[in-house]
Amino acid sequence: MNEFALTLIQWFRENGRDLPWRETRDPYAIWLSEIILQQTQVKQGWAYWERFMRRWPTVEQLAEASEDEVLREWQGLGYYSRARNLHQAAQQVVALGGFPDTIEGLRALKGVGDYTAAAIGSFAFDLPAAVVDGNVFRVLSRHFGIDTPINTTEGKKEFALMAQNLLLPALDREGLGAGLYNQAIMDFGAIQCTPLSPHCPSCPLQETCVALHEGRVGLLPVKQKTLKVRERRLTYVYVRCQGFTAIHRRGEGDIWQGLYEPLLFENGELRTERYDNTQYKEGKTNHTSQFSVFNFQLIKKNVKHVLTHRILLADFYLWEPTERPPLPPDYFWIEEAELDRYAKPRLIERLLESLT
């Protein structure tokens, strides 16, 4: 076994995280944890993993759930395409008669990429596949002094090859599997070789760490600049009428697909004029004939919500008409008491919390 791998494993046995999905070889439990943790910190994802395992203890039960039920349990985690992929992949697994036990088979599941396939494969089936996530990028980049940008095609190939070449010698010693090594290097990045303020003085790899000796710890890993983050303005109107409110489900091709939200206005602030039924029916505006800004009570202004490639700025109004107004297409009335049954984006939850 190479010294790098041996040092990581020794460190892991003393410092590794005690996580419930590491106490099983059940591919369902492991797969579920990996999907949840794709864009989520362990501390937050842990509770969601337990929630899903309680409600749907098997992949068959998850596959039988409705998409709305899965999205509702996922609410608050963000990146909701993961929840939809999770549900579809569960149905794939059931159709296959069980989880695939090859990297190629795992990779074919909806929402499973190279990293997730390697993680599930090594943890559940001890397949000799190296994981490469943000923690692994950071450890390898710093220790070996690699400045190839990790978010480029060249960088991804270079680090994947290096990770695999480091993994294989680690499997030579009897009783040491790919899962152990993968967990060791990931935890080392999460606990020891952290993005900010890494614990270099107590690092067992300090003698061989190139970045430490060259004073480049804070410069590695390198990321190529990506697209500029754009702003998007949203105006929401919460309609409250005789114990009912109006919502709709977001469609495909945009953020928050499949989630529910109140009445939405985009592309400019609310207008003050009223619109007649002809304009409404001809689709010249997405406002109804009775909408007027003078009827609305401003609850929140410029609420900021940050997504990966955009910043959302939301205004939130309350409207309490005495009679139900006509609604734009795709909106419908529900009892306010039933609102919690519908999965909503975190931004909408924040806005709703400001209502009295």
Image: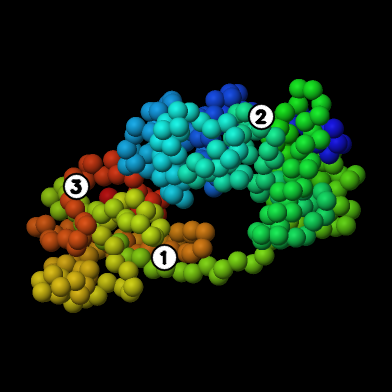
Callout count: 3
Residue 312 visible (yes or no): yes
59 relative position to 274: left or right = right
Residue at figure coordinates x 9%, y 57% from the top left: 323
Q: Residues within 10 Å of mark 3 (few under 14, many from 20)?
A: few
Amino acid identity at mark 1:
Leu
Q: What separation in Å lies between label 2 and label 1 (alpha carbons)?
A: 46 Å
Q: Residues within 10 Å of mark 1 (few under 14, many from 20)?
A: some
Identify the mark at residue 22; answer none if there is no mark: none
* In the rendered image, the vertical position of residue 7 relative to residue 213, given as above or below: above
Rendered location of residue 84, percent (x, y): 41, 45
For marks 3 and 2 on the same chain, the one whose residue lies earlier in the sequence: 2
Q: Which residue is mark 1?
A: 313
For marks 2 and 1 on the same chain, the one whose residue lies earlier in the sequence: 2
Q: Which residue is mark 2?
A: 126
Q: Would you say the residues marked 1 and 3 are in contact, meaning their CB atoms lie under 8 Å apart?
A: no
- Closer to viewer: mark 3 or mark 2: 2
202 relative position to 35: left or right = right
* Quadrant for the N terminus in the image: top right
Q: Would you say the residues marked 3 and 2 are in contact, meaning their CB atoms lie under 8 Å apart?
A: no
* In the rendered image, the vertical position of residue 232 relative to residue 10, given as above or below: below
Viewer-proximal residue among 322 and 203: 203
Q: Which residue is mark 3?
A: 334
Rendered location of residue 183, percent (x, y): 68, 34
Circle 2: element type: loop
Residue at figure coordinates x 16%, y 47% from the top left: 243
Residue 47 visible (yes or no): no
- Closer to viewer: mark 2 or mark 1: 2
Amino acid identity at mark 3:
Ile
221 relative position to 352: left or right = right
For marks 1 and 3 on the same chain, the one whose residue lies earlier in the sequence: 1
Rendered location of residue 256, percent (x, y): 39, 54
